[in-house]
Image (cartoon, rainbow, N blue to C red):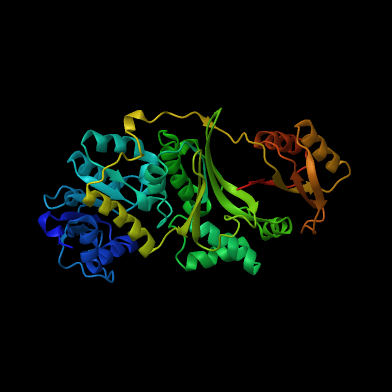
Amino acid sequence: MSDTSSSKPPLRLGIAGLGTVGAGVIKIVQRKANLLAARTGRPIEISAVSARNRDKDRGVDISAYAWEDDPVALALRDDVDVLVELMGGADGPAKAATEAALAAGKDVVTANKAMLAIHGNELAAKAEAKGAVLRFEAAVAGGIPVVKALTEGLAGNRITRIAGVMNGTCNYILTRMENEGLTYDEVFDAANALGYLEADPTLDVGGIDAGHKLALLASIGFGTRVAFDDMVLEGIERITIEDINHAADMGYRIKLLGVAQMTGRGLEQRMTPCLVPVKSPLGQLENATNMVVLEGDEVGQVVLRGAGAGEGPTASAVLSDVLDIARGFRISTFGVPATTLDSSTPAVASTPAPHYLRLSLVDKPGVLAKVTAALGDAGVSIDRMRQYGQHDNPDVAPVLIVTDPTSRRAIDEALTVMETSGALAAQPVTIRIEDV
């Protein structure tokens, strides 16, 4: 086979951000230069880099690359064809450098889910106005090629639902709680010590990080403008070991599950704890692994599973976008031109489903009757109910209820009545039971 890469000019990268992922990208380019050139037909080279600390030891040699203190200056260098933005953050230097590159007609590859979830619509429009591409495979589910699956492999489908576990830290916490019988606080502290948590832990355990990812996938899947602000978000902070044990007794596991689907009422987007069947693909997911389930009218259900974070998997996703650019493959940011993306109407979950309720009731005569009446008046029927264990406070009675399929709206209506009637001694825990 003849070498065609030498007849084409190299694709020159400027890498902004030299953390774990940035170092991983450099390692792949250095170690696999011949392989990358063979697969694209042209060399892939790094011209310059930028980070906050020039002298930090990153385990990779950057001495051959030009250095820029300012990532905007990096983006505007004449010897940079593609800005690889790996700094993170919705605004600040990341957004400034991305906008500078796009304004100059340069392509951008980013792993920055927060920036795209907040500013993706305007950035996509700016890219297309300049004939540039903005790619973000690494921003969603690490090494899982889910963006490519939606924009390319399933492009002939009408997507009906997107669901998945998209935050490895939350899955790590929940599976360790279950497998080792540990409390949330114990596993949270362990995850923090291992460096699994973001500097602001609520981005992980509050569902925000995973919500950013789901909003991007929903935009691609349903042809809508990114609408992160319309997402229903609920984290895992209030999940207890008792909840996990109760779920296991019923044949379920608790996952922080994202679901997006277009309904007759509008676009439903939610990132909340759910009970999923233990024997389902999502139910068998362990530790920090991610899984995304895509459903299309022609293909049915497609399940993608893999490492959702880490140096190698995320750097691999960055390089997949770089290699597409090197091959000359150009596609709109969200699969269709940004000007054609529809504004979606936000919708709450309307599909009926069973719900798990953990209630702490005031231990007085007649309180249980108030609870059942509130549920009945809201149209919620009870599949099973039992009092469990003992509460630290003898005046509080813990009660577990599993409902028949119903809407969250009906559940919330019943809980409001319970609260105003004085039946509740503490805030209840409500978890949807999802069949995926």
Residue at figure coordinates x 40%, y 33% from the top left? 225
Residue in the foreground of this view, choosing between 150 and 361: 150
Residue 133, placed above or below residue 202: above
Residue 21, placed above or below residue 376: below
Please identify the quadrant where the N terminus is shown: bottom left
Residue in the foreground of this view, choosing between 209 and 325: 325
310 left or right of 262 in image: left
115 left or right of 322 in image: right
The image quarter containing residue 323 is bottom left
334 left or right of 194 in image: left
Residue at figure coordinates x 75%, y 41% from the top left? 404
The image quarter containing residue 25 is bottom left
Residue 60 is situated, as x and y percent measured from the top left of the image, at 25, 70
Report if residue 382 is visible in the image.
yes
Residue 134 is situated, as x and y percent measured from the top left of the image, at 29, 44
Give the residue at the far right of this rendering. Answer: 365
362 left or right of 95 in image: right
Residue 420 is situated, as x and y percent measured from the top left of the image, at 74, 35
Residue at figure coordinates x 64%, y 63% from the top left? 178
